[in-house]
Image: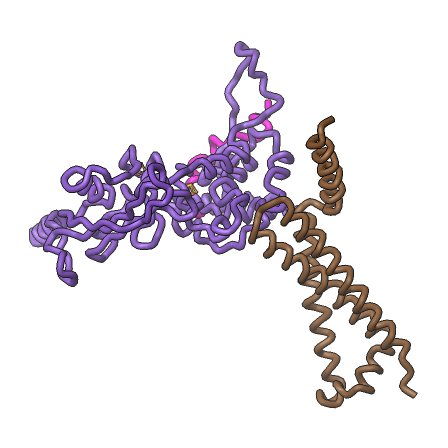
Amino acid sequence: MNIFRKDKRKEIKNELPLEVSNNTSTSNKGSVKLRVFRVNAVQNPNDIPHFDEFQVPVKRWTTVLDALLDAKSYQDSSIGIRYSCRMASCGSCGMKINGIPRLACYTKISDLDTNTITCEPLPNFPYIRDLVTDFSQFFNHHRSVMPFMQNKKADIPNTNELTEYKQSPQDLDKFLQFSYCIKCGLCYSACPTVATDVKFPGPQALSQAYRYFADSRDSDKSNRLKIIDTNHGIWRCHFAGSCSNVCPKGVDPALGIQLLRSHLLGISKSEKKIAQLQDRSTNTYREEDGEEQIEKEDLKE
Amino acid sequence: MTSDNIKNSKNKKTTKWISNITLLRESQIMKIHYITGVAALFVVAIHILMRLIMPFNMSLEFENVILNYKNVFYALLLESILVLIAIHGFNGLRVILLEIRQTQIWERGVNILVIIAMIGIIAYGTRTIIIANGLSLG
Ligand code: SF4
Ligand code: FES
């Protein structure tokens, strides 16, 4: 009975408004100071960027996006923000929050441990307005790695004969984590090479190149390698690893880049390590599926 | 053909000639980069260890240094250090310079200059080794 009461108290405590330490003159209990980067590069290319400050009420569960929308609704409707899903799925609300690229909808203010939240547009992207940046170059790089399945044997015009592409769970494991990318651009904005080399495809595009390269259903592997094996291609990665640090979906683009490099250097079959990792993390995965494991030969047939 | 077209076709010819200079794919260049880097570590290690066959200050005396060059195997070791480090170092420089700017002229200019500088350093160093090897101490 006592244990139950203890838990209940904890729950209630979690629902209370966030207690914020009072170390700035403007901050109140249950509110934070939001510093929002303001610029209008479209209307006035010479516009001088500055920060506007807003005091917004917060609860323990308030995200940075909620706070920004609160400021937009009740204090300044001209704040430029891009968002859609509010659940870390669409990848549109990426911004630099307190110096680190993050998704605004996925960052709780209570996790930031401060009463001043600074929101800036993503670095390495040209400004459009306020927190909205231009993703054209980013998507061009993404397009350049041909992020779609290519299989010359696929009998696409013959729809009667069209059958599904089968794939074993092991083959799926080889690229699954890379297919979780939501194209939010956080890795691109954190990459030090992208900051200096505009022709460098960036971690997102390179990890997608690996995602399609490692897919057993794709047949255009040598061409995929050629696309990224250029002066400004995959070899310009310094392996800073900041892309993997900021990725909100656990894609680990730095791993994809290293795996692709190992293929280019001729140390092949490295992608198997991912399948083994998956094997260990899920532990019973193979045992459970053991009886149902589809033989590769069967799949080919 | 307008003068602009003539200019363009001339430019294209030069561009083709210049781009032919870099015949290797980037992965092949980087393979060479890594191999020369690892190999240079070994030969430089041998080179440093050779200082230990006599007291260190003696090993750097003029006569002893020239005697080293007179040993064909040692001269070959020095030559290999020169070649490996020149290739590895100048490619490293090329990689750094390529990141600074991304215009075609810059990229080609860097490629050509790096190749010329590399060949120049190797030629000059080889000349030094050959002269020292043939130098009479008497
Ligand atoms: S790899 Fe991660 S950080 Fe980069 S775009 Fe995809 S989801 Fe965003
Ligand atoms: S609003 Fe969709 S990812 Fe944040």
Asked if residue A189 can be seen in this view, the reply is yes
Q: Is residue A4 left or right of residue B95?
A: left
The hue used for chain B is: brown
Q: Is residue B131 above or below residue A116?
A: below
Residue at 21%, 39% (x, y): give it.
A69
Q: Position of residue A78 (x, y in %)?
A: 23, 38
The foreground one among B99 and A151 is B99
Q: Nearer the viewer, residue A238 or A13?
A: A238
Q: Is residue A51 above or below residue A131?
A: below
Residue shown at the point (76%, 42%) measured from the top left? B17
Left or right placement of residue A104 versus residue A1 in this view: right
**Number of callouts:** 0
**A76 part of magenta stretch:** no
- Residue B23 is left or right of residue A212, and the answer is right
Quadrant in which the C terminus of chain A appears: top right
User: What residue lies at 27% left-to-right and 41% top-to-bottom?
Assistant: A105
Compared to residue B83, the image places residue A188 above or below, namely above
Q: Where on the image, by quarter, is ligand 2?
A: top left
Spot the residue most to the top.
A160
Q: Residue A131, image x and y in percent?
A: 31, 43
Is residue A170 among what the camera can see? no
Q: Position of residue A68 (x, y in %)?
A: 22, 43
Which chain gets the purple colouring?
A
Residue A129 in picture, x, y percent from top left: 32, 40
Residue A294 falls within the magenta-colored stretch:
yes
A34 and A42: which is toward the camera? A42
| Residue bounds of the magenta highlight | A280-301
Q: Main secondary structure of the magenta part?
A: helix
Which residue corresponds to the image point at 68% horizontal and 51% vertical from the top-left?
A: B109
Residue lying farthest to the front in this orientation = B3
